[in-house]
Amino acid sequence: MADHFLDAQGLNCPLPILRAKKALKGVPAGETLEILSTDAGSVADFAAFCRTTGNELLQQGEDGGVYRFILRKPA
């Protein structure tokens, strides 16, 4: 279970990433953010986002068209 949660379902690229970036500003270092998205492009987007920002992609998965990501903000 993540420390913080963001529901980005129904939003298309680039909004899930932009909302996650904004939400991460309020997440203390070392804590996690869970994001739900229905945008299939978010799989590649979140992988690239984590590579470029230093956030750690702990988990990702898909269930019934809903993509779930858990990111850890670096310390």
Image: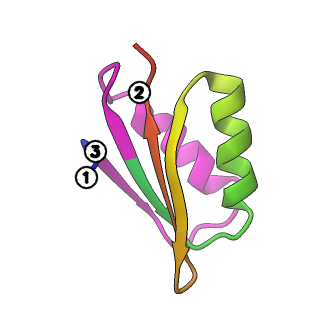
14 within the magenta span: yes
Whole-number angstrom distance, CA of label 1 to CA of label 3: 9 Å
User: Can you tell which of label 2 and label 1 is closer to the viewer?
Assistant: 1
- Name the residue located 37 percent from the left edge and 43 percent from the top edge: 33
Q: Earlier in the sequence, mark 2 or mark 1?
A: 1
Is disc 2 placed on a helix, strand or loop? loop
Looking at the picture, how far across and down is residue 64, in whole percent?
A: 52, 86
8 relative to 53 in the view: left or right:
left
Count of labels in the image = 3
Pointer 2: what residue? 25
- Could you classify mark 1 by the number of other residues whose Cα lies within 10 Å: few (under 14), some (14-19), or many (20 or more)? few
- Could you classify mark 2 by the number of other residues whose Cα lies within 10 Å: few (under 14), some (14-19), or many (20 or more)? few
Pointer 1: what residue? 1
The reply to whether discs 2 and 1 touch (Cβ–Cβ < 8 Å) is no
Pointer 3: what residue? 4
The amino acid type, in three-letter code, at marker 3 is His
